[in-house]
Image: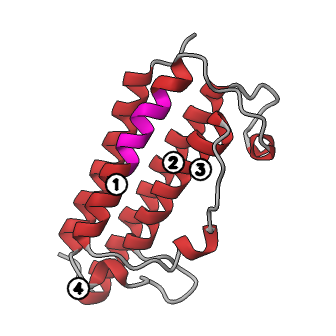
């Protein structure tokens, strides 16, 4: 079964669109607040992390691009809503190109990160599926963080 680049891109776009909806509803400065203290992540930082996850797995892992990723810094990133929209747009544009290259057979990068993929068969399509899984998993985290922040402002049930 071939993983189609347009279908994959549509799923990535949907996840990012939903993340930005949550961020817009929360607004600033709440997108920068950690909902349950320093051990949790702010919505804005999670969106930055998701962009970096997408870039890392499709670029260096699938397409052998060099990486200078600072994963830890992603979780303390503070960007305005406008900057988050720009970051996501850039990420989606890059992902679109990357997915086309992967679909054209230009992937196959050998990277130690592939060992973290489930199973023993780790083709480029597995990398693409992994990115989608990560984005939707983090979308859930973003939605829970937003719920916790809203609850802390109005703890009375409707």
Quadrant of res 156: bottom left
C-beta proximity under 8 Å, tags 3 and 4: no
Q: CA distance from mark 2 to mark 4?
A: 38 Å
Q: CA distance from mark 3 to mark 4?
A: 41 Å
Q: Residue at x 31, y 41 (%)?
A: 14
Earlier residue among tags 2 and 1: 2
Q: CA distance from mark 2 to mark 3?
A: 6 Å
Q: Residue at x 26, y 85 (%)?
A: 29
> Looking at the rendered structure, which numbered label has been put on residue 56?
3
Relative to residue 82, is residue 35 depicted above or below? Answer: below
> Looking at the rendered structure, which numbered label has been put on residue 54?
2
Q: CA distance from mark 1 to mark 3?
A: 14 Å
Relative to residue 75, is residue 121 depicted above or below? Answer: above
Which numbered mark, 1 or 4, is in the foreground of this view?
1
- In terms of depth relative to the viewer, which is nearer, 153 or 2? 2
- In terms of depth relative to the viewer, which is nearer, 80 or 117? 80
Residue 33 x, y percent position in the rendering = 38, 85
Residue 21 x, y percent position in the rendering = 23, 58
Earlier residue among tags 2 and 4: 2
What kind of element bears circle 4? loop
C-beta proximity under 8 Å, tags 2 and 3: yes
In the rendered view, does 70 fall on the left or right side of 3? right
| Residue extent of the magenta highlight | 91-99
Residue 34 x, y percent position in the rendering = 44, 83
Q: Which residue is mark 4?
A: 156
What kind of element bears circle 1? helix
What kind of element bears circle 3? helix
Q: Which residue is mark 1?
A: 88
Earlier residue among tags 3 and 4: 3
The verdict on residue 59 being magenta is no
């Amino acid at each position: 079964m071939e993983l189609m680049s347009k279908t994959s891109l549509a799923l990535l776009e949907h996840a990012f669109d939903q993340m930005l909806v949550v961020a817009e509803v929360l607004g600033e400065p709440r997108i920068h607040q950690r909902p349950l203290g320093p051990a949790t992540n702010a919505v804005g930082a999670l969106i930055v992390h998701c962009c970096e996850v997408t870039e890392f797995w499709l670029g260096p892992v699938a397409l052998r691009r060099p990486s200078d990723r600072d994963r830890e810094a992603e979780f303390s990133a503070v960007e305005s809503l406008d900057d988050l929209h720009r970051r996501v747009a850039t990420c989606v544009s890059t992902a679109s190109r990357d997915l086309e290259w992967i679909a054209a057979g230009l992937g196959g990068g050998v990277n130690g990160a592939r060992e973290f993929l489930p199973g023993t068969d780790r083709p480029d399509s597995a990398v693409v599926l992994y990115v989608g899984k990560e984005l939707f998993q983090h979308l859930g985290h973003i939605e829970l963080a937003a719920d916790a922040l809203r609850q802390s402002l109005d703890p009375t049930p409707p």
